[in-house]
């Protein structure tokens, strides 16, 4: 699909932020407790085969996936400042986190850099062909472009699915998406 322009993406981001906020605010305690707590079998095998694995610290209604990844070596995104590039650094649950340049939690400056074998990335919207709508900074897309061999798994609530994500030439497709309801293979690399 050709570019739908930045305005279409901006409007879709607003709509999907609202949808995610409303959905998570209305999750009952049992659904919240059960969501993203265990890896589905095919994904568990991928995680084991692609250690270390990059994840993220959830914020603003994003699914919290750290509890389902306790048996693997974890890496988290790290930004040294308000620059275009990011890297990944080792982190273990319970270790302190620093405040990143956009207010996100990230490993300290002294944490060891590492390259993941698989990346679980947050998103605002996705489609079944692997389209991913992120926050708009392009950090993940630039990292994916620099490391095209790394598997990319989007993480989202099911309500974040759309028919078609507006795609631009710099947007990287996902290999799969995990929601609280299903594991969706979107590419041909899995």
Image: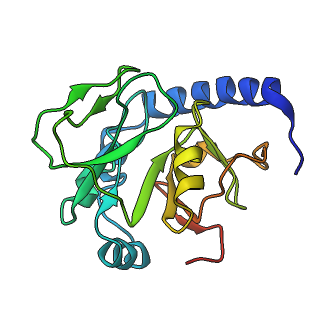
Q: Which quadrant of the figure contains the C terminus?
A: bottom right
Q: Residue placed at 87% from the left, 36% from the top? A: 4
- 121 and 126: which is toward the camera: 121
Asked whether, in this view, residue 171 is left or right of residue 76, the answer is right
Please say if 22 is above or below 145.
Answer: above
Q: Residue placed at 36% from the left, 51% from the top? A: 35
- 26 and 48: which is toward the camera: 48
Please say if 103 is above or below 138.
Answer: above
Percent position of residue 115, x then y? 35, 59
**How many marks can you see?**
0
Q: Residue placed at 38% from the left, 67% from the top? A: 117
Percent position of residue 149, x then y? 53, 69
Asked whether, in this view, residue 33 is left or right of residue 15, the answer is left
Which of the 4 image quarters holds residue 134?
Answer: top right
Asked whether, in this view, residue 115 is left or right of residue 173, the answer is left
Percent position of residue 59, x then y? 37, 30
Q: Residue placed at 75% from the left, 31% from the top? A: 9
- 141 and 69: which is toward the camera: 141
Percent position of residue 170, x then y? 71, 46
- 78 and 53: which is toward the camera: 78
Q: How is the image coloured?
A: rainbow
């Amino acid at each position: 699909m050709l570019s739908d322009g930045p305005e279409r993406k901006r409007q879709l981001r607003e709509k999907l932020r609202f949808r995610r906020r409303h959905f998570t605010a209305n999750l009952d305690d049992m659904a919240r407790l059960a969501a993203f707590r265990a890896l589905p079998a095919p994904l568990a095998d991928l995680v084991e085969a692609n250690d270390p694995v990059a994840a993220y610290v959830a914020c603003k209604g994003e699914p919290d996936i750290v509890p389902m990844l306790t048996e693997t070596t974890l890496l988290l995104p790290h930004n040294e400042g308000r620059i275009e590039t990011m890297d990944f650094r080792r982190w273990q649950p319970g270790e302190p986190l620093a405040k990143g340049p956009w207010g996100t939690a990230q490993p300290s400056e002294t944490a060891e850099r590492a390259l993941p074998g698989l990346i679980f990335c947050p998103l605002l919207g996705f489609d079944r062909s692997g389209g991913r709508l992120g926050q708009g900074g392009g950090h993940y897309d630039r990292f994916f472009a620099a490391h095209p061999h790394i598997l990319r798994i989007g993480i989202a609530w099911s309500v974040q699915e759309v028919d078609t994500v507006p795609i631009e030439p710099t947007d990287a497709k996902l290999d799969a998406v995990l929601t609280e309801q299903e594991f969706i293979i979107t590419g041909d690399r899995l």
